[in-house]
Image (cartoon, helix red, strand yellow):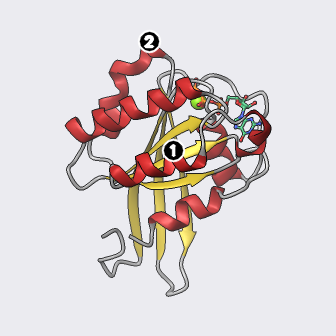
Amino acid sequence: NLMATDLKCLRVKLVLLGDSGVGKSCIVLRFVRGHFEPTSKVTVGASFLSQTLALQDSTSVKFEIWDTAGQERYASLAPLYYRGAAVALVVYDITSLETFRKAQYWVKELQKHASPGIIMALVGNKADLHESRAVSFQDAMEYAEKNGMFFIETSAKTADNINQLFEVLLET
Ligand code: GTP
Ligand code: MG
């Protein structure tokens, strides 16, 4: 339970995993800086950003966000970032079945090697491209339920469900 403690500012280590190009960095930039960068560059290694959310009861939550690189050549670095993470966001692109399969690979890896209590969310990004959808909402939701994960579809481009994604994590 992320909110169990009574601290004034709770720190939550969060990691994003998923194939290159699914929009992990765009999600983080949308959440932290409030804008969309269509020409976002491929992440090299990983990048770190933080964002503090104020809650109604005068406490706040600081998300310490590790945005990993999705390119295959960086896959072996991932444990450095998900180890000790309280939350993992596993991101795919709703227009690409390939990226959904890759997400399932990351879920299995997290189940084997991450902290047992890690909170995982499956994030279907690029929901604005629903006309090119390749992964159904239903299939993804069922997969998430089976694996005890949250599920949400987002768009870093339109900002749809980006804040909700982070807020819902605090309800656990
Ligand atoms: P790596 O750093 O290589 O792992 O990729 P990444 O997952 O960080 O992808 P990135 O955030 O760089 O996004 C890749 C491209 O996808 C961006 O340049 C955007 O043009 C596009 N993109 C990201 N999010 C969205 C979205 O919600 N909708 C649409 N239409 N395009 C998006
Ligand atoms: Mg990136």
Mark 1 surroundings: few (<14), some (14-19) or many (≥20) residues within 10 A: few
Residue 134 lies in what quarter of the image?
Answer: top right
Residue labelled with disc 2: 73
161 vs 6: above or below: above
Q: Residue at x 65, y 50 (%)?
A: 154
| Residue at 55% in and 50% down | 138
- Tell me the SS state at disc 1: helix
| Distance from mark 2 CB to nearest ligand 1 atom below 8 Å | no
Quarter-wise, where is residue 133 in the image?
top right
Q: Amino acid at mark 2?
A: Arg
Q: 50 above or below 114? A: below
> Which sits in the foreground, 137 or 87?
137
Residue occupying the far top of the picture? 73
Q: Please state the quadrant of the image where ligand 2 appears.
A: top right
Q: Nearer the viewer, residue 80 or 19?
A: 19
Q: Residues within 10 Å of mark 2 (few under 14, many from 20)?
A: few
Dot 2 falls on a residue whose secondary structure is helix
Identify the mark nearer the N-term, 1 or 2. 2
* Picture disc at residue 58: none
